[in-house]
Amino acid sequence: MALLITDECINCDVCEPECPNGAIYMGEEIYEIDPAKCTECVGHFSEPQCQQLCPVSCIPFDPAWRETTGQLQAKYERLQAELKAGSPEIQNAGQNIG
Ligand code: SF4
Ligand code: SF4
């Protein structure tokens, strides 16, 4: 299950740099979480870091993204593999050159 930032967010900037997956970003008005990148911190920490740190407790689990620990672990491993391989854009550019 990914996490979700509600409109109670006060844009305090605390959570964004603490996400080990780079899943938190500034949206149109408040911070948002990319569910494709949020692993509930599985693979990095035993507890969701953003949830632990948010001063107004506005980061619940997102019921729209139900995932097992195995699925979250698989997402973590995919993200790590992508990091090692570089972004898809870089890879595509390399293929075009080759
Ligand atoms: S739970 Fe962890 S991975 Fe998900 S957004 Fe929060 S800090 Fe990032
Ligand atoms: S820590 Fe909470 S209040 Fe601060 S930016 Fe993140 S979600 Fe918003």
Image (cartoon, rainbow, N blue to C red):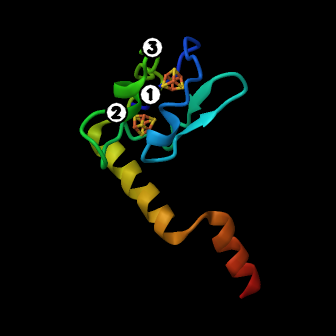
Q: Return the x and y of residue 80 as percentages of the image width and height.
A: 42, 60
Q: Is residue 50 left or right of residue 34?
A: left
How far apart are the alpha carbons under marks 3 and 1? 15 Å
Q: Is ligand 2 closer than 8 angstroms to the Cβ of mark 3?
A: yes
Residue at the spot 41% in from the left edge and 49% down from the top edge: 75
Q: Are marks 2 and 1 in contact (CB under 8 Å)?
A: yes
Q: On residue 3, which mark appears?
A: 1
Q: Are marks 3 and 1 in contact (CB under 8 Å)?
A: no
- Of callouts 3 and 2, the N-terminal one: 2
- CA neighbours of label 1 inside 10 A, class few (<14), some (14 to 19), many (20+): many
How far apart are the alpha carbons under marks 3 and 2? 15 Å
Q: Nearer the viewer, residue 27 or 75?
A: 27
Which residue position is annotated with label 3? 56
Please name the amino acid that badge 2 sits on. Pro
Q: Nearer the viewer, residue 1 or 90?
A: 90
- Up/down of 59 relative to 90, above or below: above
Location of the C terminus by quadrant is bottom right
- Up/down of 88 relative to 25, above or below: below
